[in-house]
Amino acid sequence: MKYETVCGLEVHTELLTKTKIFCSCTTDFGGEANSHCCEVCTGMPGTLPVLNERVLEYAVKCGLALGCEITRFSRFDRKNYFYPDLPKAYQISQLYLPICKNGAVEINDSVNGGKKTVRIREIHMEEDAGKLIHKDGRSFINYNRAGVPLLEIVSEPDLSSGEEAAEYTQKLREILKYIGISDCKMQEGSLRADVNVSVRERGSTDLGTRTEMKNLSSFKAIKAAVDFEAQRQITRLENGRAIKQETRRWDENKNASVLMRTKETADDYKYFPEPDIPPLVISGEYIERIRADLPELPEVKRTRYVDMGLSEYEAEILTGEPEYAKLFEQTAELTDNPKESAKWIMGEYLMLKKEAEGDLAPEPLAKIIKLVNGGKITRESGKKALRAVFTEGAEPLSFIKENGLEVIADKELINRICSEVINENVKAVREYKKGKDKTFNFLFGQCMRELKEKASPDDIKRTLKEKLG
């Protein structure tokens, strides 16, 4: 514990605009290589960029959701570097006057316990680069992604572990999805992080030499990369070797960071104001109009859900995705039973989502919950009905009637089945009467099976206990 980890993240998120940041090309993912580009996004001579107004709106929206100050007078800058993924040899970004500054996100403190605040230094707008594909000893370039609008969210070095870095990125993802500005599909590169890591002696306030790992595209990779790189640097220091400022690549197959190149600084990029785009002057009315359009954010929802009677764990799961929260709130309103609605969504619905493609409206789910709670069908029958609704689009009441899933209310039949199960399982009955309570569950299960899980569990248990004495 002689050393501590110091980490800051640069999180890049592609925005859900229909067109690119400076031209009218589509932002759709995929497509034939180099089919989503034009003279502007491929940097042809004589072309001029025109800012997509939706990008500015989304940037302000993101800044407000993260508690940032909005820069009323903002502008773009040229970041010069020579690499094939940037056809015009520079990227239009923001260095001197970024659109947002001084925000914050609260996470769990993995070192000291409790909560900690991760400061956001700035958020700036920029264009994405193209993609290089290395294959069979050759390199190919796909410019479909060049010019797709990005927000880069830059934190201060307030993170102390891989666990914190992953949680911070998860919190950002939640907020970005709730405010509707990005789909955050990490597998498609629409949310990715550059990780800056250094170490220092515990208690010191000086920052160590940092290294950077680029384009980490999963929470697992972010956590592993931070922890590995911190340990790599500690080992070097303990062996009397210096840390070099460099850019490294995270190799998931080796579970290790690999040297790419020495780290560039701002001077290497030769930033200067972008001459082809005028400065942005934003009014207070514009900012307040966007603020008024902000939805309820995840942390506020979690608190409200706990006040509705849910556990903190249930509230955490249900606010993890906007679609879960929407389904829960609508279902809870229809059933007037938040707790049962939460159980069905967290249990059956999420299990079905993992197994198959499909969707679920709140109305059929609410019908099934009411039928189960009203004793009209058993929970098992409710699960069967919900599966049919999810996978086949069935109507709950029709499916239940067509498949004879209504609760068996025939007390004589329940009596007879319970008697038969007792007579056929003498050994289990004997063990139960000797005090082995677990055998009751076996007998109960046999009765449920014989009654095809359509009788009320409470009726079976009561009848069985009466007969066993």
Image: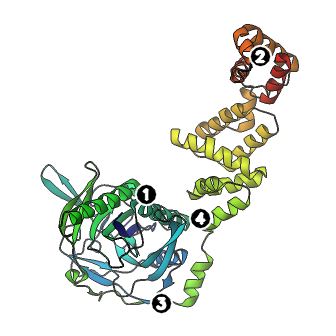
The residue to which callout 2 is attached is 433
| Relative to 142, 437 lies left or right | right
Q: SS of the residue at dot 4?
A: helix
**Quadrant position of residue 124:** bottom left
| Amino acid type, callout 4 | Pro
| Amino acid type, callout 3 | Arg
**Quadrant position of residue 365:** top right
| Amino acid type, callout 1 | Lys
Q: Do the residues labelled 4 and 2 touch (CB within 8 Å)?
A: no
Q: Which of the two marks, 4 or 2, is nearer to us in this view?
A: 2
| Amino acid type, callout 2 | Lys
| Relative to 424, 24 lies left or right | left
Q: Quadrant of the N terminus?
A: bottom left
The answer to whether residue 447 is seen in the rendering is yes
Q: SS of the residue at dot 3?
A: loop
Mark 1 Cα shell of 10 Å, populated few (<14), some (14-19), many (≥20): some
Query: Residue 299 placed where, x, y %?
Result: 60, 66
Q: Distance between the residues labelled 4 and 3?
A: 27 Å
**Mark before the other along the chain sequence, 1 or 2:** 1
**Mark before the other along the chain sequence, 4 or 3:** 3
The residue to which callout 3 is attached is 72
Q: SS of the residue at dot 2?
A: helix
**Mark before the other along the chain sequence, 3 or 2:** 3
* Residue depicted at x 77% and y 50%: 337
Q: Which of the two marks, 1 or 2, is nearer to us in this view?
A: 2
Mark 3 Cα shell of 10 Å, populated few (<14), some (14-19), many (≥20): some
The residue to which callout 4 is attached is 298
Query: Residue 11 placed where, x, y %?
Result: 39, 68
The residue to which callout 1 is attached is 185
Q: SS of the residue at dot 1?
A: loop
| Relative to 387, 55 lies left or right | left
